[in-house]
Image (cartoon, grey):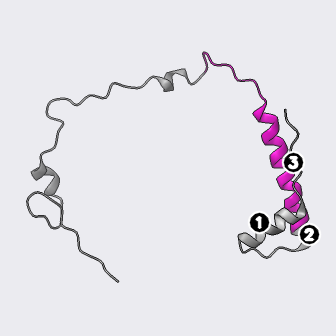
Amino acid sequence: MSETKKIEKSEIKKLAGLSKLSLTDAEIDSLTGDMRSIIAFADKISGAAISVGDDDYGAARELRADTVGVGECFTPGVLLSNAPTDDGAYFILPRKCP
């Protein structure tokens, strides 16, 4: 695991400025500690060993066959039947200009 750069209060102040947040010194101290904890946790889990193999989610990786059966296709007329306005081939939408 590599050495992590320590988050400084000045960086939290800069992020607050970019985010247009007004923070008190106490909030900056708290957020600095929180950010350090988050980064330390991310460093910790980034070094975790991951094994590829059987797991509880194996079934979710098996995808269904993507097929279209007879009678499952819609004709343009069926699709356009719910359109408020159409020209027989396309939906016609109102033009909204400022």
**Mark 1: amino acid:** Leu
* Quadrant for the N terminus in the image: top right
Query: Residue 39: x percent and y percent?
Result: 81, 46
Label annotation for residue 15: 1
Q: Residue at x 26, y 28 (%)?
A: 67
**SS for callout 2:** helix
**SS for callout 1:** helix
Examine the structure image and report whether residue 23 is included in the region drawn in magenta: no
* Quadrant for the C terminus in the image: bottom left
Q: Is residue 82 above or below residue 49?
A: below
**Mark 3: amino acid:** Lys
Where is mark 3, residue-wise?
5
Residues shaded magenta: 28-55
Q: Residue at x 87, y 55 (%)?
A: 7
Where is mark 2, residue-wise?
26
Q: Earlier in the sequence, mark 1 or mark 2?
A: 1
- Residue extending farthest to the bottom is 98
